[in-house]
Image: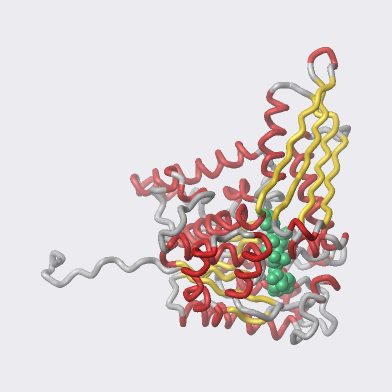
Amino acid sequence: MENSNGAKAHPPRTRRLGIWLVGAHGGVATTTAVGTLAIRKGLAVPRGLVTELSDFSALDLAPLSGVSFGGWELRPGTWREAAHEIQDRSGTFKESLLGAVEEDLAGFDRWVKPGLAAGCGEAIGALAPGARREHPVDFFARAVEDLARFRREARLDAVVVVNVASSEPPPAVGLLESLTTWTSFAKELKRRLPRLPASVVYAAAAIEARCPYVNFTSSAGSNVPALAARALKNGVPHMGADGKTGETWVKTVLAPAFLARNLKILSWEGHNILGDGDGRILAHLENARAKLQDKDQALRRILKDPAVHSRVRIDYVPSLDDWKTAWDFIHFEGFLGVKMILQFIWQGCDAALAAPLILDLARLVEFAQKGGEAGWMTHLACFFKNPRGVEENGFEAQFERLRAYVRAHVQNRRNPPLASSALFRYRR
Ligand code: NAI
């Protein structure tokens, strides 16, 4: 084929996206990598990916065929070993599927680099007792270089960092809020006795390397004033926190429905039991604290009624592995004060619920950066239990916000002169 100048035209090169996973050998990270390869080889359909819905087809999102993986991890091992462990314990992948993607999976091992254990608490520290203990300031410099090298050597157009590491204990009260400038952050980073949680150092490195950042966990991540300001300055989109994949997603679908029918919620008890690595870490109250709060707040912010009794429990049941069961008991009042009950039982394979959303988020933040957007990506609230910069917690309203974003971008593309409104640029 020739172009209008008579020169030989090359087919457009596939846009290549790198997804850098913090907690690379965990259940969510490994399932994301295995699933992407399976879809790419035509062994699975992209079920569960919101970005594969028809509404999103007009956006120029990075194709899954061009995705590569890398990341930081504390535990030794390979991606293949991690995938087999998941397979043996939870049976998430068909044996034949795993066999077909193993070689490609092994190709990503060269991009898994040692992580940072500082500020993660005892439970996480115990995951890799023999790991090299790097000071955060040295790690930060290496991390920025790890991301740059991944981009350069894997010939990527963009790299997105996604935090899927174990949940950290909260840092000292007021510490993160006090870091309002990059100078104050840099000073804290250099402290001889580190106080910053690793998730914050990872987020800072991503922002410094100009990589969009997603915090899928309840850890602090980029939720620090100095990092939010730096993200705007560096043109970096970021969003969190804590992926909304199962019980909390259903809660935020149901709660607005009760309000719409003027039914009064009296009590909402949610009891979660799960196994695997996440459950093991969440068995430590200090590691579970932020997640328990995220799960409860999502409901309370919708109900806006301080009199409601609500509680969330998370218990570790090792034999369940990645299969989580949540039992929710909703006591509510209807006409004439009649009290009624709704109960639901949610049984999900946690990583299989999370993995497609990781791909969605990576594609959407990369798309945002390509269009010049930076700061908190509030249109992605529907993916999170505790969305930053957003008051709305009802799922449908949040999802409508995402649809509106997509419609505005499609409209912008069809009608470029109107695009100058910079509607989606530099959100604060
Ligand atoms: P996992 O325990 O299987 O994996 C976590 C991985 O992170 C482990 O390989 C661990 O060694 C690694 N890690 C821990 N601290 C690290 C650090 N400082 N640096 C580098 N690596 C580190 O847990 P899973 O099930 O994969 O979940 C990952 C995260 O996603 C958890 O925080 C979980 O609460 C969160 N999440 C998961 C959801 C789901 O699975 N549906 C929903 C919402 C949040």
In the rendered image, which quarter is residue 289 located in?
A: bottom right
Report x, y in % for residue 62: 43, 61
Report x, y in % for residue 386: 71, 50
Of residues 416 and 329, which is closer to you in this image?
Answer: 329
Query: Can residue 235 be seen here?
Result: no
Q: Residue at x 87, y 66 (%)?
A: 172
308, above or below 22, in the image: above
Report x, y in % for residue 170: 83, 63
Report x, y in % for residue 266: 85, 29
Ligand 1 picture quarter: bottom right
In the rendered image, which quarter is residue 216 located in?
A: bottom right
Q: Residue at x 76, y 73 (%)?
A: 184
Left or right position of 276 against 269: left
Of residues 65 and 361, which is closer to you in this image?
Answer: 65
Tally of numbered tags: 0
Q: Residue at x 60, y 59 (%)?
A: 92
Left or right position of 78 against 285: left
Query: Can residue 169 be seen here?
Result: yes
In the displayed image of the protein, which residue is found farthest to the left? 6
73, above or below 14, in the image: below
Left or right position of 172 against 211: right
